[in-house]
Amino acid sequence: MEHNKAESVRALDILSQPYTIEKSDRISHALEVMEKNNVNYLLVTNEGVLEGILTKQGIARTVGERSSDYMVKPSSSLHVAKAMDENLITISGETPIGEVCRLMNDVEVLAVVNGQLTGWITFDEVVKTCTPSGYAGTIMEAPVMCSPYDRVVHVRRRMIDEDAWWMMAVDDGKLAGVVTESDIAKALSKFRDLVKEKYQDARVRKIIVDDVMTADVISVWTNTPCEEVVAVMLEKDVEGVPVLDLKETLVGMITKGTILKNL
């Protein structure tokens, strides 16, 4: 019965109100909107017409572009158009939940358009309708790790090369914290605004992961049911969680993408 109910769900049944930003706005303003509404992406409009998506990852990579090895552009000098992605998938309100789940394997947001922008569908809306079975240990992926003592500029380069938006800082086999592209972008942008240009090159090299990471990390165990993992991610509003074994050793990670792939 529940299975049949899920099969009859359409995009219109689960969409939520999207947050938008104008293409001409500055990235600094977009970050303020994201922080205020606790979201990692915004739909980009141009005089009300949908044109693309802006993500924190896109902002991090744009703000972090360097004209020299360690020069960082302040977000206050860049416009949304510079960091937006035009490859946004739009669907109709009649799209069935099965197709929604399939599409969400590859994207963070689906824009629902019925003549005009009606709403969006994100991870949160999908997993309130269907969740994977099993345990964290059966769906987890290999963790992407660094040391708390690694230099931030080197970790950021690894993130780009390995297409990773976060890394787990591990010290002597134990989880010490988590660092994301957003953490690095904010830290470097703030550094660029506060430190005189002639001192930046030397000082930015000294910033280490421990200076910018989040130490108070939400984690799950290998035997945590997947339904509980999803509940934790929704309640704490996090993009992913580290997975620990019963000896509290980091053994894996689960992201929103991991969950969607296992629906």
Image: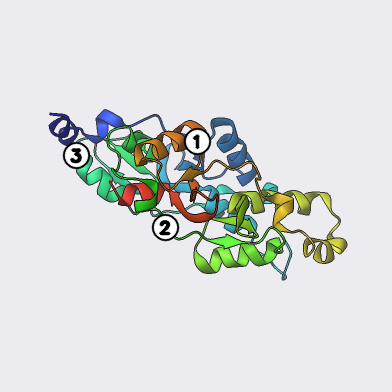
The percent position of residue 223, horizontal first and vertical second, equals: 40, 45
Q: Nearer the viewer, residue 186 or 79?
A: 186
- On the rendered image, what quadrant is the N terminus found in? top left
Near-viewer residue (257 or 245):
245
On the rendered structure, is 236 left or right of 257? right
Query: Does the image show residue 239?
Result: no
Determine whether the residue tagged by mark 2 lies in a helix, strand or loop: loop
Q: Please determine whether, in this image, residue 4 is positioned above or below residue 23.
A: above
Question: How dense is the environment of label 1, judged by Cα within 10 Å: few (below 14), some, or many (20 and up)?
Answer: few
Q: Which amino acid does label 2 sit on?
A: Glu
Q: Earlier in the sequence, mark 1 or mark 2?
A: 2
Q: In which quarter of the image is residue 205?
A: bottom right
Q: In this view, does 66 lie above or below 109?
A: below
In this picture the colour scheme is rainbow
Task: Give SS at disc 1.
Answer: loop
Query: Which residue shows up at 62% across the image and 56% down it?
Result: 169
Q: Nearer the viewer, residue 69 or 97?
A: 97
Q: Circle 3 is placed at which residue position?
A: 96
The answer for how far apart the CA atoms under marks 2 and 3 are is 28 Å
Q: Given the image, on which type of amino acid does mark 3 rest? A: Pro
| Between discs 3 and 1, the one toward the N terminus | 3
Name the N-terminal-most of marks 2 and 3. Answer: 3
The residue mark sitting in front, 3 or 1, is 1
**Which residue does the numbered mark 1 point to in the structure image?**
237
Work out which residue is located at the far front of the displayed protein and give it. Answer: 247
**Residue 73, how many percent across, how many down?**
70, 57
Q: Name the residue under label 2.
A: 141
Residue 108 image label? none
Query: What amino acid type is highlighted by mark number 1?
Result: Asp
Separation (CA) of disc 3 from disc 1:
26 Å
